[in-house]
Amino acid sequence: MSSSTLNYPLLSIPAYYIFSLLPHMYAGAILSSNGYKVNNANPKASLSPSAVQGKVPDAVYQKYQRAENAQSNNLEQMPLYAAAILASVIAERATVKGLGHAATGGDVMGLSSFVASWFMVRTVYTVAYVQIADHTTSFFRSTMWAVGSGLAGYQIYKAAQILGQ
């Protein structure tokens, strides 16, 4: 970790939240491009599957649903990601000069690699979720989900090892 005044891994938590909203924005865009009008006075109701179905072509409807599901899954993974970041930051601080002190040398917990890997895997996962409509190839998406969850689990495990000493 660098000696800058900002803790970038912590800032990656709200960045991931914004990232998680992108599939929802895409879902709205594909509906709009197919003539569907969202009622902003009650957007959740107007974007519900029952409100959309039959008002756009079926292929568009299916892609819209996959995009909304990708957003939902990204948000479901956020607590795991945030826990991995927070546990790692605490463990990193505890290894240097005791809890609460900034790390001065290196990336003890490998946070830079974890953050980059997480975003890369979740990007591939999200694109696969939205684009893959075939049952057989959908298992690639599931594999990406497992890899991301495994990355976070391993990061928490490394923090537990350090903090358990």
Image (cartoon, rainbow, N blue to C red):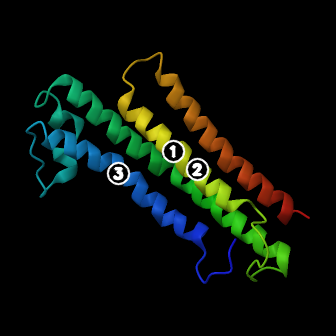
Does residue 99 lie above or below 11 as drawn?
Answer: below
Badge 3 or badge 1: first in the primary sequence: 3
On the rendered structure, is 145 left or right of 20? right
Residue at x 22% of width, y 30% of height: 61
Q: Residues within 10 Å of mark 1 (few under 14, many from 20)?
A: many
Between the C-alphas of marks 2 and 1, the distance is 6 Å
Q: Please name whichever residue, 25 or 43, is drawn nearer the observer in this view of the structure.
A: 25
| Disc 2 target residue | 118
Element assignment for label 1: helix
On the rendered structure, is 40 left or right of 9? left
Does residue 44 lie above or below 51 as drawn?
Answer: below
| Disc 1 target residue | 122
Between the C-alphas of marks 3 and 1, the distance is 12 Å
Locate residue 82, reporting x and y percent. Answer: 58, 60
Locate residue 1, reporting x and y percent. Answer: 70, 71
Name the residue type under label 2: Trp
> Which mark identifies residue 22?
3
Name the residue type under label 1: Arg
Residue 98 location, quadrant: bottom right
